[in-house]
Image (cartoon, grey):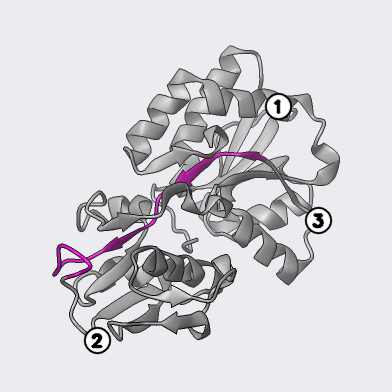
Amino acid sequence: MLKTFLARPVAALALTLGLFSTTQAADALKVGTTAAFAIPLEAAVSEAKKQGLDVELIEFSDWIAPNVSLASGDIDVNYFQHIPFLENAKAAAGFDLVPYASGIINNVGLYSKKYKSFDALPQGASVAIANDPINSGRGLQLLAKAGLITLKPGVGYKATEEDIVANPKQLKILQVEAVQLVRAYDDADLVQGYPAYIRLANTFDATSALLFDGLDHKEYVIQFVIRPQNKDDPRLAKFIDIYQHSPAVRAALDKAHGKLYQPGWES
């Protein structure tokens, strides 16, 4: 996952605290998220209110605070991460957190400003992928799906460059900060790209990837994550049902992501 940034202005106090709350109901279900996922969740909050369920949406400005806040009990559920990110966070900080329900998977693609096909890539072409363990593995899996490299069997999202067993075009793999991948589009021959952030940057067409991964790797489905003791909270079940099945939420997802996402709960 990419290190997030605030896509919309918030109050100075929100920036200081690292979060933004859309409501203040004391007994509301508290849902934490980040900017990339907030708009469809706002639609779910609105639908929930119509059905008598109070939900407080809290928007964080980084990708550390949502798990810290959840682990400490300040929120009831968060929605911004997939399984590899969650497992990495748990290993690093010892969080006792578990996935509760599936959300969407945001497609990740391989983009090229210079070439219209993988066959057109020259020998020694430069390929920019993310440099963090979570995203670089996804980038390498995409290159393998494209037939550009071969990885050791079974390495999955934990793949590193050391797991490449064949690289017939002798691609030069450049690992850069994930947030810089959009800029790398102008310089590298091929770039790993995240449509949600390409749309926010508004620098090139997010639909123009030569290849998307989609549900090939279901571990990247964004999860609603909770503390284990909250698994029987009826408010959670109701809110997830609204998110997954409300026509208004689906319309908000389509508006926010176009066709560059898939519902993970339908797979």
Query: Which residue lies at the image location 25% right of the left edge and 49% below the top edge?
Result: 207
The answer to whether marks 2 and 3 mark residues whose Cβ atoms lie closer than 8 Å is no
The residue under the point 55% across, 47% down is: 222
Which residue in the structure is indicated by mark 2? 124
The residue that mark 1 highlights is 237
Element type at marker 1?
A: helix
Whether 248 is drawn above or below 198: the answer is above
Amino acid at the residue labelled 3: Asp
Q: Nearer the viewer, residue 264 or 201?
A: 264
Q: Nearer the viewer, residue 46 or 175?
A: 175
Tell me the amino acid under the disc marked 1: Ala
Give, as a single range, the part of the protein colored magenta: 101-119
Residue 79 magenta-drawn? no
Dot 1 or dot 2: first in sequence order is: 2
Q: CA distance from mark 2 to mark 3?
A: 45 Å
Residue hosting label 3:
96
The type of residue carrying mark 2 is Gly
Q: Earlier in the sequence, mark 2 or mark 3?
A: 3
